[in-house]
Amino acid sequence: MSSTTETRITRPVIGVPIDAVSWRQALDRLHQWARGRESRYVCICNVHSVVTARQDEDFGRVVREADMATPDGAPVAWMLRRLGIAGQERINGPDLMWKYCAEAAATGTSIYLYGSTDRTLELLQARLRQAHPGLQIAGAWSPPFRPLSPEEDEDVVRRINDSGAGVVFVSLGCPKQEQWMARHRGRIRAVMVGVGAAFDYHAGVVRRAPAWAQRYGLEWLYRLCSEPRRLWKRYAVTNTVFVLRAATQLLRH
């Protein structure tokens, strides 16, 4: 593991700054920030979140002000390659969480799990401890499906800070998790990473797309086939908007 963090390099993908970063660089940043208990947040950006950041001013500000915004979706990574970042890979939430936990188990860095349901958190902790012996899980909490009162929120901040966790993995879904992280930067003394459905995948509650679909950038299609009623409109609209904006950007570039 490298002991230094390289200078941050970003490229605008349809106007949204995305980090040009390797797996090693992304993990090294998390390790460095976690060791210092630095209050930072990381956005994992797929096509949906990039398009939403362009269309929603508040969400766009959250992504732009993130300490790192990684290219999750294959089209986002492809755009970075077209913009001069040779070999840019997808840095997605589930894999980033899994790779970090493997290294945290070896280095003694503790993590905190925030989001999802009590049952999923129970299964997730068992799976992580089995796969990564020695991993320190400092705490886990499933928040209610409603806004927290100021008193409840202060209690959450206190519990996370008192736990000593260096990284807080947040699984609340987009854009809720990104907004939550932005509101808590400066209050929670840890790196917050929004990992979307990673808790469900690693807990075994939801089946992730097979490796070949991930490799060829078709994970979105697998998810669409799994939940067509919920996701068809999102993919139909955001994918079309992304293609049109990306084509315009590349023609100008």
Image (cartoon, grey):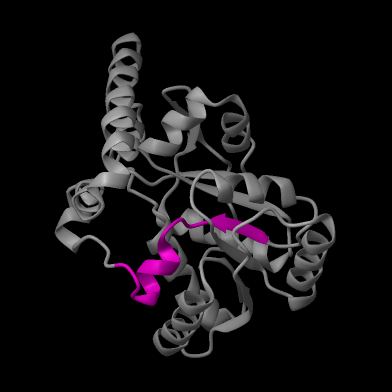
- What residue appears at the point 50 percent right and 61 percent down from the top-left corner? 27
Q: Which of 33 and 39 is in front in this view?
A: 39
Residue 134 position, x and y percent, is 53, 89
Q: Residue furthest toward the top? A: 252
Is 122 on the left-hand or right-hand side of 39?
A: left
Is 8 on the left-hand or right-hand side of 201?
A: right
30 lies above or below 246: below
Q: For residue 151: magenta?
A: no
Residue 82 position, x and y percent, is 29, 28
Q: Nearer the viewer, residue 159 or 229?
A: 229
30 lies above or below 236: below
- What residue appears at the point 69 percent right and 68 percent down from the top-left corner? 35
Residue 179, quarter of picture: top right
Q: For residue 195: magenta?
A: yes
Residue 87, quarter of picture: top left
102 lies above or below 246: below
Residue 228 position, x and y percent, is 23, 47
Q: What stretch is highlighted in magenta?
A: 191-206
- What residue appears at the point 59 percent right and 25 percent down from the top-left corner? 57
